[in-house]
């Protein structure tokens, strides 16, 4: 299906079913970042990493309410061994930027919308082929 004829569920329930619960191993963290790997017994070269970071709002006279937005990012790096034996890394970046006055309910609603765009089959052509139709 195309973006042009797609639809999304607003404020629906998002549920991940099946799969195998796999814990994370912390590799390091500080006040603004946290690096972890999937605890799936992969060799070092094949470890999937998750890098979390956040930036607090800062005073900004040019911002609508006098502060920049809070920014929360999770970058996922997934190593792949290609058919020719070479290695590459697929990445996925999740990012949320919100005004300090955005309520927790509004943040949750935005994440539900984002999950629908990530998972709804209406957007498969975009995610798999980069289709802009």
Image (cartoon, rainbow, N blue to C red):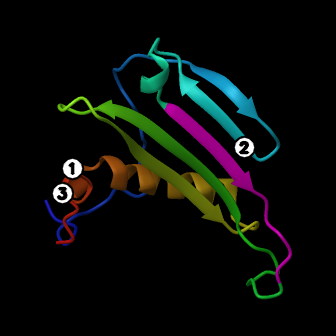
First reached walking from the N terminus: tag 2 or tag 1: 2
Check residue 4 for magenta coloring.
Answer: no
28 up-or-down from 88: above or below: above
> Residue placed at 18% from the left, 57% from the top?
129
Question: Could you tell me which secondary element the residue under label 2 belongs to?
Answer: strand
Give the numbered dot on residue 121: 1
Q: Which x, y percent locates residue 103? A: 69, 60
Give the residue pinned by disc 3: 129
Q: Is residue 11 visible?
A: no
First reached walking from the N terminus: tag 2 or tag 3: 2
88 up-or-down from 27: above or below: below
Q: Is residue 3 visible?
A: yes
- Distance from Cα at disc 3 to Cα at disc 1: 13 Å
User: Split into 4 quadrants, where in the image is the N terminus?
Assistant: bottom left
Magenta region: 49-60
Q: Is residue 66 left or right of residue 74?
A: right
- Distance from Cα at disc 2 to Cα at disc 1: 33 Å
Q: Which x, y percent locates residue 84? A: 18, 32
Question: Could you tell me which secondary element the residue under label 3 belongs to?
Answer: helix
Q: Which x, y percent locates residue 21? A: 46, 17
Residue 56, by quadrant, is bottom right
Q: Which x, y percent locates residue 110? A: 52, 58
Give the residue pinned by disc 2: 33
Give the numbered dot on residue 103: none
- Distance from Cα at disc 2 to Cα at disc 3: 32 Å
Q: How many marks?
A: 3
> Residue placed at 40% from the left, 16% from the top?
20
Q: Is residue 35 left or right of residue 119?
A: right
């Amino acid at each position: 299906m195309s973006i042009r004829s797609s639809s999304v569920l607003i404020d629906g329930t998002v549920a991940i079913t099946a799969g195998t619960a796999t814990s994370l191993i912390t590799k390091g963290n500080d006040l603004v970042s946290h690096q972890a790997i999937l605890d799936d017994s992969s060799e070092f070269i094949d470890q999937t990493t998750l890098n979390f970071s956040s930036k607090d709002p800062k005073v900004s006279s040019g911002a609508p309410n006098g502060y920049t937005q809070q920014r929360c990012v999770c970058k996922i790096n997934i190593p792949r061994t290609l058919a020719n034996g070479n290695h590459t890394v697929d990445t996925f970046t999740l990012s949320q930027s919100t005004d300090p006055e955005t309520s927790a309910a509004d943040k949750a609603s935005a994440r539900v919308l984002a999950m629908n765009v990530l998972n709804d089959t209406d957007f498969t052509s975009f995610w798999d082929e980069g289709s802009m139709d």
